[in-house]
Image (cartoon, helix red, strand yellow):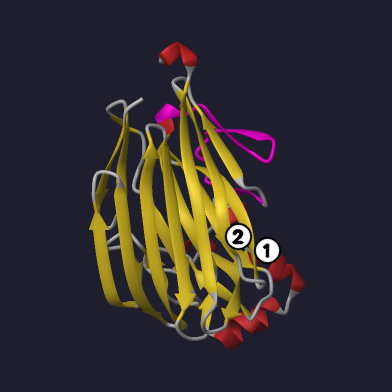
């Protein structure tokens, strides 16, 4: 098997298996109540990168970034590597430079739909229906299966703050499979309703209004991670605003968050 990549826009943008690109750009992302950061150049809003360094070669990609968010400041270190003819490892670690709010902490993978018949997570087999539903579980492995090869995305190591919990998900979005390795708040600092549209760029409602709405248990249950569990079920006029509620955790200065994840490509015997 021959494995090659292309690095552009600060991420692994293409991954070639025997000369065929099987991915859309990978990356890293995180958010607070208002700001959204993405490693991919040109994506993200309401934050400022105070320091940026990137370096790449045929088999290494590294980055060091200091970012000021709306509700925090942290330093990010990235180290991705082609380990062998069939394996890529990815590493991301953030250290808080000041007390910071986190909605999540995500290593992102995207694979072209046409190469994989189904996904497997937590003992469940999922076929692509373009549902965009998040099939999310507290696991450390997701497998994508195709006619030519299988891909195993596996958590190798992590640093998860006590306020957060680790999960993985796979979703069938449009013409791709999306896999996230994800930390989510377990102990909340606050709960926020975000307007999840392109025009609003996940802008939050004023906190007193979010607090008032989420006091209602039925409304809270209706809005809780709404865009992930039921992404196509809003009617007009709510479809214009696409509201979802999310918890936020507060992490102290010096706190570290880290993922180390392997992507292993196993060629089917009849295609070797």
Name above or below for residue 118 compared with residue 134. above
What x and y, as percent, mark residue 216?
A: 73, 76
Name the one closer to the observer, 226 or 11. 11
Q: Is residue 254 visible?
A: yes
Q: Quadrant of the N terminus?
A: top left
Q: Is residue 234 visible?
A: no
Name the one closer to the observer, 9 or 46. 9
Label ID, residue 226: 2
Name the one closer to the observer, 230 or 110. 110
Q: How many marks?
A: 2
What x and y, as percent, mark residue 28?
A: 42, 59
Which residue is farthest front?
84
Q: Which residues are magenta?
A: 114-137
Residue underneath mark 1: 222
**Residue under the image location 61 percent in, 62 percent down:** 225
Q: Quadrant of the C terminus?
A: top left
Q: Residue 223 falls in which quadrant of the image?
A: bottom right
Asked if residue 53 lies left or right of residue 269, the reply is left
Secondary structure found at label 1: helix
Secondary structure found at label 2: helix
Asked if residue 114 lies left or right of residue 236, the reply is left
What x and y, as percent, mark residue 188?
A: 66, 77
Asked if residue 49 lies left or right of residue 214, the reply is left
Label ID, residue 28: none
Are the two marked residues, 1 and 2, in contact with CB atoms closer than 8 angstroms? yes
């Amino acid at each position: 098997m021959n494995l090659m990549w292309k690095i552009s826009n600060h991420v692994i943008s293409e991954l070639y298996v025997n000369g065929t690109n099987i991915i859309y750009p990978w990356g890293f992302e995180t958010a607070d109540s208002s700001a959204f950061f993405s490693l991919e150049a040109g994506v993200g809003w309401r934050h400022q990168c105070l320091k940026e360094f990137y370096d790449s070669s045929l088999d290494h990609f590294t980055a060091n970034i200091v970012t000021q968010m709306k509700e925090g400041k942290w330093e990010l270190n990235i180290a991705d590597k082609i380990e062998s003819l069939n394996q890529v490892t990815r590493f991301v670690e953030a250290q808080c430079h000041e007390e910071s709010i986190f909605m999540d902490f995500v290593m992102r993978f995207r694979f072209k739909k046409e190469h994989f018949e189904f996904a497997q997570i937590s003992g469940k087999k999922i076929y692509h229906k373009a549902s965009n539903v998040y099939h999310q579980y507290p696991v450390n492995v997701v497998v994508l299966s195709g006619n030519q090869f299988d891909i195993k995305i596996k958590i190798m190591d992590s640093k998860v703050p006590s306020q957060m919990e680790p999960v993985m998900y796979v979703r069938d979005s449009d013409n791709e499979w999306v896999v996230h390795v994800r930390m989510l708040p377990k102990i909340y600092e606050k709960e926020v309703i975000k307007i999840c549209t392109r025009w609003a760029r996940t802008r939050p409602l004023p906190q007193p209004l979010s607090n008032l709405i989420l006091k209602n248990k039925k409304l809270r249950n209706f809005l809780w991670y709404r865009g992930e569990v039921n992404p196509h079920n809003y009617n007009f006029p709510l479809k214009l605003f696409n509201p979802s509620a999310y918890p936020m955790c507060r992490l102290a200065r010096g706190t570290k968050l880290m993922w180390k994840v392997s992507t292993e490509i196993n060629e089917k015997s009849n295609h070797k």
